[in-house]
C-alpha cells in the first residue's frame, strides 16, 4: 500500500512539472502578443512604419507555431502521465474500498494500516471516531477452564460473560469464595500488560494496577517509592508520595520512628511496647491479626519419616517457656494450629503437653535413644508470630539437646531463599516459620498448609486433606465443626509440624499521623492515613521478594502489592468483613458452585487503559492455569492459587 502511494505521488509530480512547462510557453506567447498590440497602437498614431508592424507580426506567428508544437508535445506527455496516475489511483481505490474505506476516521485509518481499531486508537486517541468506534465494538469475552474437574481443584472455569461481569464456576461448593477472592494475590492487572511482559521478570518488578498508588521506583536494598494515583476510583490519598523502607532490627526501626525519619513502623519489638506507650510523640497500635509460629519437619527426610520422632519432638519442647521469655504480653501457647479466634480453629483435642521423659522414651522406641544430628533453619525476619527469631532458634537448639539429646545446628538463610526452599519441601531438618491470617476463615490456615498439593511438610496426609476438602464445601460453621475436629485430631496424631505460639504484636506511628492503623487482615491502607505532609514513610521488616503477588506468600511483598494492585473484593480497615473493591458484588447460586461478580465501571489502570472483565480472566488465568503461557512469575510456586483453590488446573503431565 505504501509503495503504491509513492508511485502515485511521483507521477503527480511529473504531471505538475509538465504543466509548468506549458505555462511558461504560454507566458512567452502572451508577451509577444502584447507587443504586437502595442506596435499596432503606435502605428495608428503614425509613429512607426507598416513594415515594422509586419515584422513583429511575423515573429509572433513564428513564436505561436513553436508554442503550439511545444504544447502538443507536452500535452501528449501529460495525457500519458494522467492515464498512469488514474490507473494507479483506481487500483488503490479498489483495494481500499474492498478492505477499508476512504475517510480520515479511526476505523478507516486502522484498516489502512492493517491494525485493530483499539490498537490504532491507543496510539492515536484524538482521531475522529475512536470513542464512538470503541463503544460500537462488541465486547468479546475471554475465559479459562480446566479440561474437567478430575484434576481435583476447586475452579472449573472463569468466564467474562460481558464487559462488566465475570462468572466463576466451581467444581464443588465453595462458600468461602468471597473471603479468599479478597486476598491480595488475586489482584488484577491489565491483560495487555501481562501479555507484554510475558508474565516474568518485567511483571515481577513492574506492576500496573488500579490501586491508590503508582510504583515510581524500586531502589534495590533501600526503598520503594510510589506516587498518588490521581485517577483512583475511590477516595485518594491526602499526600503525594509513599515511601516503603525496611530494617530487620526492631530497635533500628524504633530509632527511625523516634527521630521522625519514618512515619510508621511494623512489628514493634516486645521490649519496646512500654517505651512507645509512654512516649507522647508516638502512638501504640495493637495488631489483632490471628497468627501461629510453628516448628516444621519435612517427612521425606530421615529421621522425620517416622511419626514417633515427630511426636517426640512435639512433646519434648517447653513451649510455655518460649512464650514467657521471647513473646510480648498477650501472646499464648498454641493449643491448635489455627488460633481460637477463627471459627472451628480449636475444635478437637488440644496439643501435647510438655513431657521430656515421655518424649525421650518415644524417641528411643523410634531407634534414637541417644538422639541424632539435624539442623534448625530460619530467616532473620521479625514477624508478629516470631518477634525474636535468632533468640528463639538458640532456645530450641538448647531444649532439643537437653531434653532429647538432639544436636541441632542453627542456620540462618536469606529470606527469599528460605521461603522458596521451605515452600518446596527442600529443607532437610527442622525450620521455624509462621503464618498471619490473610482472611478470617479456617481454610486460610488449614487448607493452605495441609492441602493435597502442598509439599511443604513432605508427603501430604490424606487423613488430613480429604477431610478438609469435604469441610470446605460447607458454609455453616456449626455443620462443618465435626469435620474440622477430625482434621485437627489428625494433625495432632501425624505431627507434620509443632504449633508453638500465637503471638501478640503491635505497630507504632508518629502521634501526628491521623488514622494510623494496622488491619487485622492485611497491611495498612496507607491512602486512608494522613501524615499532615506530602510524604508518608513506612518501615517494614524486610525488602519485598517481588511486586507480583500472584506468585508470592511473604508478608513484605503482600504489603507492598496491595498498595498498587487490587482484587475484586477486600477486607475492612478494622475487621475481616469483606467489602467491594473492583467488583461491586459477588453473588452465589444456591449451592455456592457458581459465583457471579459484577465489576465496577469507569475504573482505569495506572497506564490509562480501561478495566474490564477480560483483565480479570487474564490475571486469574496467569495464576491458576499451569498451561498458560504467562504462568511464569518469580518462584513458580503460585502457592495461594495452588493451595487455596485445591490445585492448579491444566498441569502438564510431566510436572
Image (spheres, grey):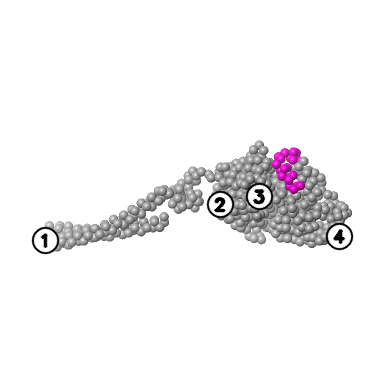
Q: Residue furthest top?
A: 590
Q: Which mark is residue 135?
A: none
Q: Is residue 469 magenta?
A: yes
Relative image position of residue 379 (x, y in whole percent): 73, 58
Give, as a single range, the part of the protein colored magenta. 462-481
The residue carrying pointer 4 sits among few (fewer than 14), some (14 to 19) or many (20 or more) residues within 10 Å by Cα, namely few
For the residues labelled 3 and 2, say whether their Cβ atoms are less than 8 Å apart: no
- Residue at screen point 20% across, 61% down: 63
Q: CA distance from mark 3 to mark 2?
A: 23 Å
Q: Position of residue 398 (x, y in %)?
A: 83, 59
Indicate left or right for 581 with 389 as reference: left
Quickly name the residue at label 1. 50
**Residue that label 3 marks:** 648
For the residue labelled by badge 1, is the local secondary structure a helix, a strand or a loop? helix
- The mark lying in front, picked from 3 and 2, is 3
Q: CA distance from mark 4 to mark 2?
A: 61 Å
Which residue bears the numbered disc 4? 370
User: For residue 394: magenta?
Assistant: no
Q: Main secondary structure of the magenta part?
A: helix
In front of the other: label 4 or label 1?
A: 4
The residue at which mark 2 appears reads as 192
Amino acid at each position: 500500500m505504501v509503495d503504491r502511494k509513492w508511485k502515485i505521488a511521483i507521477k503527480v509530480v511529473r504531471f505538475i512539472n509538465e504543466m509548468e512547462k506549458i505555462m511558461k510557453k504560454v507566458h512567452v506567447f502572451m508577451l509577444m502578443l502584447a507587443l504586437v498590440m502595442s506596435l499596432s497602437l503606435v502605428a495608428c498614431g503614425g509613429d512607426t512604419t507598416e513594415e515594422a508592424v509586419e515584422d513583429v507580426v511575423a515573429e509572433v506567428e513564428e513564436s505561436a507555431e513553436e508554442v503550439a508544437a511545444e504544447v502538443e508535445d507536452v500535452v501528449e506527455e501529460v495525457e500519458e502521465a494522467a492515464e498512469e496516475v488514474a490507473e494507479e489511483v483506481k487500483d488503490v481505490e479498489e483495494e481500499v474500498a474492498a478492505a477499508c474505506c476512504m475517510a480520515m476516521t479511526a476505523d478507516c485509518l486502522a484498516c489502512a494500516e492493517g491494525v485493530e481499531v483499539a490498537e490504532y486508537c491507543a496510539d492515536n486517541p484524538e482521531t475522529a471516531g475512536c470513542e464512538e468506534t470503541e463503544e460500537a465494538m462488541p465486547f468479546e469475552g475471554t475465559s479459562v477452564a480446566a479440561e474437567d474437574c478430575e484434576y481435583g481443584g476447586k475452579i472449573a472455569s472463569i468466564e467474562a460473560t460481558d464487559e462488566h461481569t465475570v462468572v466463576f464456576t466451581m467444581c464443588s461448593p465453595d462458600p468461602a469464595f468471597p473471603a479468599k477472592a479478597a486476598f491480595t494475590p488475586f489482584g488484577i492487572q491489565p491483560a495487555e500488560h501481562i501479555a507484554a511482559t510475558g508474565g516474568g521478570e518485567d511483571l515481577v518488578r513492574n506492576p500496573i494496577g488500579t490501586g491508590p498508588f503508582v510504583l515510581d521506583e524500586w531502589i534495590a536494598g533501600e526503598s520503594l517509592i510510589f506516587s498518588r494515583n490521581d485517577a483512583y476510583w475511590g477516595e485518594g490519598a491526602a499526600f503525594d508520595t509513599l515511601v516503603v523502607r525496611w530494617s530487620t532490627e526492631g530497635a533500628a526501626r524504633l530509632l527511625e520512628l523516634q527521630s521522625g525519619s519514618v512515619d510508621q513502623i511494623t512489628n514493634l519489638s516486645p521490649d519496646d511496647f512500654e517505651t512507645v506507650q509512654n512516649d507522647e510523640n508516638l502512638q501504640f497500635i495493637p495488631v489483632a491479626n490471628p497468627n501461629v509460629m510453628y516448628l516444621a519437619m519435612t517427612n521425606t527426610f530421615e529421621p522425620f519419616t517416622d511419626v514417633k520422632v515427630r511426636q517426640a519432638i512435639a512433646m519434648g519442647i517447653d513451649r510455655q517457656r518460649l512464650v514467657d521469655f521471647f513473646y510480648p504480653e498477650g501472646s499464648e501457647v498454641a493449643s491448635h494450629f489455627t488460633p481460637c479466634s477463627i471459627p472451628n480453629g480449636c475444635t478437637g483435642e488440644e496439643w501435647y503437653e510438655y513431657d521430656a521423659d515421655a518424649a525421650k522414651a518415644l524417641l528411643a522406641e523410634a531407634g534414637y535413644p541417644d538422639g541424632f544430628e539435624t539442623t534448625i533453619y530460619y530467616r532473620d525476619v521479625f514477624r508478629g508470630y516470631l518477634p525474636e527469631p535468632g533468640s528463639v532458634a538458640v532456645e530450641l537448639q538448647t531444649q532439643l539437646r537437653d531434653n532429647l539429646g538432639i544436636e541441632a545446628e542453627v542456620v540462618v538463610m536469606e529470606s527469599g531463599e528460605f521461603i522458596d526452599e521451605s515452600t518446596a519441601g527442600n529443607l532437610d531438618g527442622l525450620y521455624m516459620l509462621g503464618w498471619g491470617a490473610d482472611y478470617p476463615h479456617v481454610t486460610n490456615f488449614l487448607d493452605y498448609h495441609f492441602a493435597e498439593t502442598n509439599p511443604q511438610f513432605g508427603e501430604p496426609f490424606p487423613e488430613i486433606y480429604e477431610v478438609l476438602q469435604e469441610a470446605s464445601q460447607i458454609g455453616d460453621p456449626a455443620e462443618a465443626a465435626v469435620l474440622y475436629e477430625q482434621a485437627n485430631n489428625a494433625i495432632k496424631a501425624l505431627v507434620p509440624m509443632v504449633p508453638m505460639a500465637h503471638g501478640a504484636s503491635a505497630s507504632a506511628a508518629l502521634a501526628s499521623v491521623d488514622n494510623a492503623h494496622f488491619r487485622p487482615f492485611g497491611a495498612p491502607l496507607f491512602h486512608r492515613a494522613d501524615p499532615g505532609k506530602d510524604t508518608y514513610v513506612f518501615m517494614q521488616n524486610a525488602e519485598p521478594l517481588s511486586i507480583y503477588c500472584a506468585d508470592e506468600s511473604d508478608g513484605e511483598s503482600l504489603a507492598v502489592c496491595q498498595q498498587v494492585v487490587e482484587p475484586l473484593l477486600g477486607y475492612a480497615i478494622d475487621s475481616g468483613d469483606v467489602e467491594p473493591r473492583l467488583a461491586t458484588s459477588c453473588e452465589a447460586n444456591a449451592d455456592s458452585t457458581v459465583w457471579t461478580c459484577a465489576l465496577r465501571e469507569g475504573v482505569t489502570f495506572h497506564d490509562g487503559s480501561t478495566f474490564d472483565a477480560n483483565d480479570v480472566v487474564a490475571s486469574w488465568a496467569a495464576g491458576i492455569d499451569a498451561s498458560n503461557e504467562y504462568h511464569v512469575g518469580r518462584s513458580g510456586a503460585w502457592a495461594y492459587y495452588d493451595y487455596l483453590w485445591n490445585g492448579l488446573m491444566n498441569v502438564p503431565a510431566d510436572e
